[in-house]
Image (cartoon, rainbow, N blue to C red):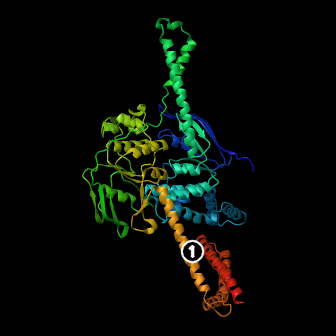
C-alpha cells in the first residue's frame, strides 16, 4: 500500500478585519483520507479560514495549494441557492463531473449527435455513474427527510435549505470535503446517519463542528485555532481534551515562572533609579520580554460560580392532558405532567413532531387544543429560542447585558456583575466595549444567552441552545447549567450536551405515536433502551415465525408433498408460460422503436419503459425457473 499524498498545503496564512487580527502565520497540511476538525472560540475566524482554504475569501497573506486534480466541495454557513429552483433541480446545479457528464449527454441528444460524439457522452455517463444520479439523490434526500422534491426552494425553511445544501455537497462526492457545522438543523437520527456515512466514505474531510460526539467518532485529527495560531492534536476529541489540558498546564507553569522572574527583574530595575541609564541595556531589553511573557493572560475556563435564582414555589408548571395539532394532524395528545423543583427534561423527536410547539405551551405563549397548562406564580421563565435576540447594533457588548441587569446574586450572598458574567462566558475585557455589529454569529448567540441568564430565571427553556456555539462556550454553559438549581427543559440535537444535563427524555412522534413517551436517564441511555426494545421486538417476531413453521411442520401427511406445487402455484406457473413470450415480444418491439426514434422526450420515456419491461421479464423468468424445478 503506497503512501497517502498531501491533499492540501497551507503556508503562512494570515487574515485581519480592520484592527481585529483573526489569525497569522498558519501553516498546516492535510493528507489523503484524513478527517480533520478545526476548533476555536466563536469569532476566532473558523469560517473565514474555511472560506480562505476554498478560495472564496482572499487571505491577507500566505498561500493555499490543493494537490493537482483534487476536487473540493464546501458546505458553507451562508447558503447560495436559487429560490425559483426545485429541490431536485438544485442538485443538478453545479460543476461536479457527474452533473457535467449529464449535461453533455443531454446536449448530445439534443443536437442529435452520432458516432464518436455520442459514444463519448455515453462513456462519461458510465464513468461517473450518472445513470443512477437521481436514485442516489432521492436516497440522500430521504435520509434528510426531504421527500417532496418538486417544492421550490423559496418555500423551504432555513433548516430544510441547509439540508438540501448538505445533500448537494454529498452527491458531488468530491475528493476533499470542507464542512462548516454540518450537524446544524439536523435531528438526532439524521446526525447518526451522517456520522456513519462520513465515517465510511474515503473522502478527505476538513470541518468545523461543535458536536463533541461527532468529533469523537468521525475525526482523527484536531486543529485548535488559539491566540491567532494553530495547535495540532493527532487523535479524536477525547485525546484532544487530554493533550490540550497538558499544554495549557505547561503554559500556566511557564507563565508563573515568568511572573516570578519578572518580580526579581523589577526589583533590579527599580533599585537606584538615578543609575538606570548605566544599567545593562541587554538586561533591560530582557526585562521587557519577561514582562510580556508574564502578562500573557491564559483564558482558562472560568471557575464555578453558582447563581441563586428566584425562589420557586411548590406549584411549578402543570400539564393536564394537553393536546396540540395542526389541522387534522395531531402532534401529541394526553400529555399529563407536573414539574418538580430542579427537574431536567430533554425533548427529542424528528423535525416537525412539535418540539418547539411543546415549549411554547410550557411557556404559556400558546394555547393547547385540549387540556390546560397551569403556571405557578413564582415561576420566572428564561427562554432561549433558535432565532436569537434582537440587538441595537449601536450598543456595545457590555450595554447588551446591562440592559437587563447590572448584577445577579450568587451563592454566599455575593453579586456577579454584568462584566464578570461576560468574562465567565469567554468575552474578555477587551471585548466589553466592542460594538455589536462587529460580533460573529456565534458571539451574538452567546450574548443572547447571557441576556437570558442575566434575568435570573428559575425555569429555563432552551430551544437548540448549542447551534453556532463553539465547544469551549458549550463547556462553560454546561458547567453553569449543572450548577443551576431551577427547572430545565431543553430541545437539542447535541447528544453530548443532553447526556450531561438531563435526567429523563421526552420523545415525540416515536413510531408515529401521538403520545409523548418518557424515558428515564439521559439521551444515550434512551438510545440504548430503544435499541434493546427493537432487538426484543425482532426476536419475538422471529420466534413467532419459527413457532408457526414448527406447527405447520408437525402436521401428519401421506407422502412427500412439501416440494410439490400448490394449486395456486400451479395456476401461477401456467400463467407465466403464457406471459413470458408476450413480454419478450414487447421488449423486442420497443427496442426496435428506440433505434429509429429522434424525439428526445419520447426517447427518455421509451427508455424508462424498456427498463421496466426488462426488470419484469427477469423476475418472471426467475420465478418460472423456480416453479419448473418443483413441477418436474
Residue at image coords 73%, 46%:
3
Question: 529 or 355, which is in the foreground?
Answer: 529
Residue, far left: 377
User: Depth check: 141 or 318 in front?
Assistant: 318
The quadrant of the rendering that contains the C terminus is bottom right
Considering only vertical position in the picture, is 81 above or below 427? below
Residue occupied by mark 1: 542
Crowding at dot 1, Cα within 10 Å, few <14 / some 14-19 / many 20+, comes out as few
Specify the farthest residue to the right: 1
Look at the picture and state if 148 lies above or below 549. Answer: above
Please state the horizontal and vertical placement of residue 510, each as a whole percent of the image.
Answer: 45, 65
Total marks in image: 1
**Is 618 on the left-hand or right-hand side of 393?**
right
Visible residue check, residue 373: yes
Whether residue 589 is visible, yes or no, is no
In this rendering, the answer to whether 592 lies above or below 242 is below
| Residue 396 shown left or right of residue 50 in the figure | left
Q: In the image shown, does 156 or 219 lie closer to the viewer?
A: 219
The residue lying toward the viewer, choosing from 131 and 224, is 224
Q: In which quarter of the image is residue 549?
A: bottom right
Tell me residue 405's x, y (percent). 30, 38
**Rendering coords of residue 8 (x, y %):** 64, 43
Does residue 135 appear to the left or right of 462 in the view shown? Answer: right
Image point (54%, 9%), residue name: 279
Amino acid at each position: 500500500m503506497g503512501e497517502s499524498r498531501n491533499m492540501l498545503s497551507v503556508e503562512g496564512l494570515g487574515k485581519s478585519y480592520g484592527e481585529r487580527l483573526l489569525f497569522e502565520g498558519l501553516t498546516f497540511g492535510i493528507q489523503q483520507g484524513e478527517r480533520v476538525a478545526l476548533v476555536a472560540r466563536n469569532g476566532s475566524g473558523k469560517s473565514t479560514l474555511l472560506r480562505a482554504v476554498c478560495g472564496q475569501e482572499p487571505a491577507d497573506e500566505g498561500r493555499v495549494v490543493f494537490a493537482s486534480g483534487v476536487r473540493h466541495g464546501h458546505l458553507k454557513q451562508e447558503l447560495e441557492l436559487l429560490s425559483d429552483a426545485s429541490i431536485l433541480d438544485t442538485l443538478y446545479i453545479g460543476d461536479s463531473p457527474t452533473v457535467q457528464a449529464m449535461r453533455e449527454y443531454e446536449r448530445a441528444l439534443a443536437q442529435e449527435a452520432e458516432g464518436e460524439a455520442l459514444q463519448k457522452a455515453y462513456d462519461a455517463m458510465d464513468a461517473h455513474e450518472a445513470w443512477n444520479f437521481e436514485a442516489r439523490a432521492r436516497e440522500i434526500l430521504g435520509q434528510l427527510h426531504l421527500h417532496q422534491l418538486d417544492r421550490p426552494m423559496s418555500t423551504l425553511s432555513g433548516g430544510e435549505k441547509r439540508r438540501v445544501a448538505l445533500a448537494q455537497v454529498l452527491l458531488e462526492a468530491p475528493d476533499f470535503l470542507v464542512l462548516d457545522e454540518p450537524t446544524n438543523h439536523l435531528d438526532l437520527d439524521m446526525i447518526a446517519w451522517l456520522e456513519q456515512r462520513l465515517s465510511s466514505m474515503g473522502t478527505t474531510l476538513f470541518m468545523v463542528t461543535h458536536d463533541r460526539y461527532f468529533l469523537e467518532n468521525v475525526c482523527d485529527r484536531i486543529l485548535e485555532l488559539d491566540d491567532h495560531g494553530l495547535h495540532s492534536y493527532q487523535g479524536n476529541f477525547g485525546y484532544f481534551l487530554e493533550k490540550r489540558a497538558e499544554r495549557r498546564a505547561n503554559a500556566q507553569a511557564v507563565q508563573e515562572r515568568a511572573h516570578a522572574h519578572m518580580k526579581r527583574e523589577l526589583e533590579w530595575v527599580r533599585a537606584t533609579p538615578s543609575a538606570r541609564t548605566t544599567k545593562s541595556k541587554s538586561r533591560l531589553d530582557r526585562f521587557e520580554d519577561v514582562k510580556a511573557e508574564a502578562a500573557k493572560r491564559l483564558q482558562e475556563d472560568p471557575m464555578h460560580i453558582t447563581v441563586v435564582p428566584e425562589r420557586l414555589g411548590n406549584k411549578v408548571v402543570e400539564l393536564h392532558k394537553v393536546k396540540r395539532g395542526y389541522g387534522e394532524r395531531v402532534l401529541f395528545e394526553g400529555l399529563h405532567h407536573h414539574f418538580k423543583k430542579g427537574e431536567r427534561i430533554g425533548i427529542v423527536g424528528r423535525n416537525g413532531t412539535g418540539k418547539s410547539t411543546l415549549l411554547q405551551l410550557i411557556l404559556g405563549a400558546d394555547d393547547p387544543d385540549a387540556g390546560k397548562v397551569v403556571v405557578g406564580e413564582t415561576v420566572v421563565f428564561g427562554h432561549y429560542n433558535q432565532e436569537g435576540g434582537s440587538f441595537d447594533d449601536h450598543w456595545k457588548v457590555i450595554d447588551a447585558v446591562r440592559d437587563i441587569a447590572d448584577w445577579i446574586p450568587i451563592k454566599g450572598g455575593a453579586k456577579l456583575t454584568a462584566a464578570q458574567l461576560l468574562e465567565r462566558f469567554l468575552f474578555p475585557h477587551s471585548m466589553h466595549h466592542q460594538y455589536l455589529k462587529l460580533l460573529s454569529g456565534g458571539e451574538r448567540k452567546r450574548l443572547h444567552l447571557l441576556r437570558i441568564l442575566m434575568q435570573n430565571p428559575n425555569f429555563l427553556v432552551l430551544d437548540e441552545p448549542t447551534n453556532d456555539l463553539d465547544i469551549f462556550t458549550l463547556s462553560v454553559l454546561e458547567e453553569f447549567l449543572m450548577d443551576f438549581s431551577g427547572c430545565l427543559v431543553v430541545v437539542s440535537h447535541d447528544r453530548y450536551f443532553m447526556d450531561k444535563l438531563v435526567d429523563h427524555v421526552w420523545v415525540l412522534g416515536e413510531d408515529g405515536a401521538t403520545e409523548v413517551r418518557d424515558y428515564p436517564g439521559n439521551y444515550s441511555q434512551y438510545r440504548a433502551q430503544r435499541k434493546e426494545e427493537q432487538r426484543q421486538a425482532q426476536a419475538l417476531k422471529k420466534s413467532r415465525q419459527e413457532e408457526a413453521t414448527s406447527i405447520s411442520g408437525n402436521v401428519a401427511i401421506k407422502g412427500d408433498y412439501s416440494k410439490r406445487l400448490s394449486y395456486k402455484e400451479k395456476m401461477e406457473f401456467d400463467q407465466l408460460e403464457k406471459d413470458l413470450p408476450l413480454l419478450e415480444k414487447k421488449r423486442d418491439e420497443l427496442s426496435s422503436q428506440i433505434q429509429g426514434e429522434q424525439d428526445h422526450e419520447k426517447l427518455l420515456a421509451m427508455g424508462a419503459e424498456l427498463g421496466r419491461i426488462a426488470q419484469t421479464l427477469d423476475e418472471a423468468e426467475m420465478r418460472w425457473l423456480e416453479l419448473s424445478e418443483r413441477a418436474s
